[in-house]
Amino acid sequence: MAAYVVIGASLAGASAAIALRQQSIDANVTLLGAEDSLPYERPPLSKGYLRGTVPLEKLLVRPAQFYSDQSIELMLGSRVTGIDASRRIVHVAGGKRVPYDSLLIATGAHNRQAHIPGIDLDGVHSLRDIRDADRLRAEMRPGRKAVVVGMGFIGSEVAASLRHEGLEVTAIDPGKTPLARVLGEEVGAKLAALHQSYGVKTIFNHSVAALEGDGRVEAVTTKAGLRIPCEMVVMGIGVEPTVDFLDGSGVHVDNGVVVDEYCATNVAGIYAAGDVANHYHPVFGRHIRVEHWQNAMRQGAGAARNMLGELVPYDDIPWFWSDQYDANIQYAGYHTAYDELIIRGHLDGASYAAFYMNRGAISAVVGLNNAKDVRRAMPLIRARRPVDRDWLRDDSVDLRTLSV
Amino acid sequence: MAEGFIAAIKTADVPVNGMVAVNVNGSRVTVANVQGVYYAFDDECTHEQCSLAEGDLAGTTVTCMCHGAEFDVRSGQVLAPPAVVPVRVYRTRVEGDALHIEI
């Protein structure tokens, strides 16, 4: 019987293990996890779990019983140290060896380390796993002064959660707006206004120089000379794919594990999915690495089908959401640059959709409190054909009628 | 437990290929009109608590707008994750101009 081994008891890894079991009743499926916890979903860590409204059980991909019922062998607290691809063996810290016929790398990503003075002071947080969230939550008290460094998705959501819990929040970002790199400055400016309206002090176009304090953080200084006194800091400066254990394995690494449309690496029998995978997306015609929930879940399952020999390209349109205050932000597609931004509704309104266009076709869409248009735009993004601009702008036109 | 069929809504109030949420005996139920055939199911998505009536109906597939879960309105079966648990479906019957749902 073939042995399927998944490295990473993550959403991507668990989704793959579940799909392997669903489609192969007699496969040996092993799920290796570096963390001690059962596979869980991370989105609530910066929102409901951090605020104490979503319990731990709600985060679990499946309850513990599921894995034993489904004969999925869980090896938690098992950090992988290396892969011997020629002998098809995974090496685990402590000396254990796990042989495989087919292997999935779903190790995700870890927080980028800021190389600035004071980063090791007490009261300086980052957020990636449950323990990080627990540590941060333990320090959240109304009236406390917090500085959020980096206004990407995690920084923005944490800022919103901290305000919700009554902390005084200052947010610092080197860009002109929150999420400027992902959503562009037009949409970003509206998100800046959203945070300001909820009482966040925002400092854009500033890079952090150092964290000051004697044992515990007392202030953040910027390269331009600002000094912001505080009692705690949350670093939200992005993640890097977790690939260190692949040194010497022969697996091609470039901004994550490079895989083709079938989630296969350059090494026979080794696949990758989720945050760690730099995947060739057939719709966009290029490699993209997606750090979001839907990609982890769907690509994990997609990789599993290919591990079982199905040869099905993974081509789901990337999609994610972010909840900040009472705003639900959803994004679908993929874009880096755009030659035109088409607004459906008004950027100043309570809901809108903004389309990132290239040569008349939609590369991506972002919606504020407008999940419907985001979802309805997905077939248009997949089609990659020019779309009538006036119809896109006109929110009385049902987007489904454009995708014939 | 089944309490029999209860008048829930006028059939004319459910547009073709549309959905409407109604309250029936304290339960919130979505009625879908698939080319003149009526289906009824719990309005609440089994993944999180979003309203399925606010989703999109394409043929016999309802898509939840919150996270994209899909269900077959005829059986309640999950067609696409993140939902894992099927949505509960109810039998329907047209009597005159009214749709009755078996709760």
Image (spheres, coloured by chain):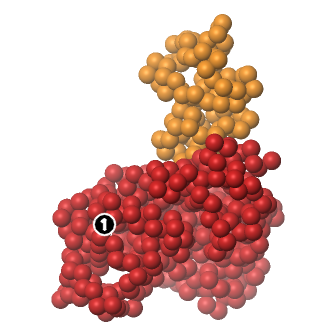
| Image x and y of residue A8, in percent | 55, 71
Q: Is residue A244 above or below residue A13?
A: below
| Image x and y of residue B94, in percent | 66, 12
Tally of marks: 1
In this view of the protein, can residue A100 be seen by the observer? Answer: no
**Furthest-top residue in this view:** B96
| Image x and y of residue A373, in percent | 61, 49
For residue A194, what is the image quadrant? Answer: bottom left
User: Which residue matches tag 1?
Assistant: A200
**Furthest-front residue in this view:** A390
Left or right: B52 with respect to A142?
Answer: right
For mark 1, name the chain: A
- What residue do we see at 63% from left, 34% from top? B76
Crowd around label 1: few <14 · some 14–19 · many ≥20 (10 Å)? many
| Image x and y of residue A166, in percent | 23, 60
- What residue do we see at 63% from left, 42% from top? A396
The one nearer the camera, A8 or A354, is A354
- What residue do we see at 44% from left, 71% from top? A178
Tint of chain A: red
For residue B12, what is the image quadrant? Answer: top right
Is the N terminus of chain A in the top left, top right, bottom left or bottom right quadrant? bottom right
Chain orange in the figure, letter:
B
